[in-house]
Image (cartoon, rainbow, N blue to C red):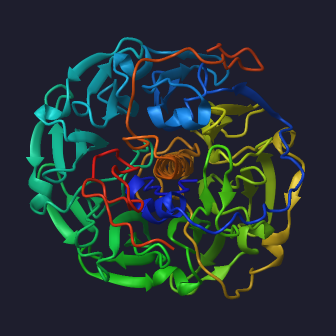
Amino acid sequence: MRPLFEGRDRRPAVLLLAFLLGVAVVVLAGPVPAATAVPLPPTQGWTQVVKGGFTDPNNSYAPTWAKFKDYLYISTSANESGAVFSGSDKTGGDIWRTADGVTWEQIGTAGLGNPHNNFFQLIVFRDKLYAISDNINDHGLEIWVTPDGTQFTKIENGGFGDKSNDVAYPFVFQDRLILGVSNRDTGAEIWVSDDGQTFRQVVDGGMGDAGVTGFGGFADPEHADPIFQGKLYIGVSNPDSGGEIWRTADGLEWERVADEGLTRSTTKHISPDIVYQGQLYAFATAGGTIDNILGFDLFRTADGTTWEQVVDNGFSVGKERNVHGDLVEFKGRLYLTSNTMDPRVLMPTNPYDRLPPRGFQLRVSDDEKTWQQIGEDGFGQASSIGAGMDVIGDTLYLTVFDYHQGSRLLKSSDGQEWEVIFREPDPNFFQEGGAPLNFKGHFLWLSNDLKNGLAIWRTDAVMVAEVTTTTAGETSSTSGGETSTSAGSTGSTGGGGTSGTGTGTGSDDSGEGADGRESDGGLSGGWIALIAVLAVLVVAALGAVAFLLGKMTRGARTDGSATSAGEAGTAATGAASTSPSAPGFCKECGAPLSPGATFCADCGSQI
């Protein structure tokens, strides 16, 4: 899903402020009984190719990826806080690549030699692969580049001379490499390069407001921020006065087109999402007190400056519901999935649900104002708390996050009837969901797990046609044999309930998506959205543990010391071994702070 949290946003880790609150909050009430178990997931037609985080369980998730010179590259994330769950003290994110999705090789060492490089944003520019590090509380972000995918050269030593420039959101626009850089002291900045070697600052000082702290969380190489009427739109965080939207026609000159959360100052981030029928849609994600988290607002504009609100407070369906959403177009209709706040308290020895889980919601609209719910909440599973979608040819794919019964992948040819084609086996409380990625016609399912490390599954049969076709080309041999009919039997004619926002944008296999973004027909948008969401959950979870146990001095996105050898994650098919008071918000990234916290669980900055 472009989901689970921030997605196209795919994007902003900050978008999921509400999710962070959901995990990071400490509650005094006892645990809620676990959801009723269901049969384990179907994995027929899938083979596990990576387990145990490749070579170390502290490689708990893979937030970013890129396709470069016939290889798929992914970056794992590893930090000190992960030791609480994994038992490993490995720090520094890895970079791994594969030519077939089965056999993997590590490129360089953990953190490319710096254990404070928690993970790397990966992006291709001018036929070179760039790795931009997340480097908190050290000396600032680093920029590495490789022309062949095997040898990286460092071209920026640390934060452009300012160690507070520690995280960057990269994107390519108008043949320029653009970095939205977070800075907790003086506010967000924008740096631009024409040649990929030298960068110049084009926006500084928090873009005119020191309260503007950061941008999106994870770059999606195939579904960038939307281009509308020839201009690129990006969302920024402003915890002080409310989220904003900025746009540019060339990457050099920028203007603010929305501020103060549009209608509420408690909106900490606004995220431009998709272009649909000549209008740009954007989600506004709110903060709020722990016992009053607001739902998302949805806006649209026909000119880029005048905004019309089409959804208010997540349809006002209840506490901690519809806190974040995303949109996708499928066969001329607009689909919306919504996500519930994560109810877990992830104490390593005794994790529990502080509230009963409540399922995601899926809706469809023909006029963008009236929404009809499809299926029951969570498609009948209350523990399915989040979902997101992507389109490939004539097929709509839905990725569902469920840590009780196993996250799963479903497909539909009409948006009403759904078939489960994969479900994660052996679900546990420390799983952070997963999402699919199309690589050379096969789906790879990346499963994130705080305790056991990243796992990857691969379909044995071709699921997606090549770029030259527009047909999804799924095969019966990879369908898990489990079908869900609840979606088709409820809500097809309307009904109440909430609307949600999925996490992908419609696209076909042959060129541009609905909003002009290039696509190769993969589940890239949905995947990165989900991973972004999952990464946020990981961050939040680690922050919660830090607060509960008082064992850490830095947040989940901080780094540590040198790598240590962990269990070898040998693939089965021969993969390389390898009610408290309101918390307040971080001045750097806009994430909510746990009561009494001395650091930010999202970005790791000191409070």
Q: Residue 163 location, x and y as percent?
A: 18, 36
* Residue at screen point 29% across, 61% down: 237
Q: Residue 254 location, x and y as percent?
A: 14, 58
Quick check: 169 left or right of 410?
left
Q: Residue 107 location, x and y as percent?
A: 46, 15
Q: Quadrant of residue 173?
A: top left
Q: Residue 257 location, x and y as percent?
A: 21, 71
* Residue at screen point 70% across, 69% down: 356
* Residue at screen point 44% across, 49% down: 223
User: On screen, 479 above or below 441?
Assistant: below
Quick check: 539 left or right of 355?
left
Quick check: 15 left or right of 395?
left
Residue 79 in sight here: no
**How many dots with numbers?**
0
User: On screen, 262 above or below 162?
Assistant: below
* Residue at screen point 53% across, 63% down: 22
Quick check: 33 left or right of 342?
right
Residue 142 in sight here: yes
The answer to which of 202 and 355 lies nearer the viewer is 355
Q: Quadrant of residue 400?
A: bottom right
The answer to which of 274 and 285 lies nearer the viewer is 285
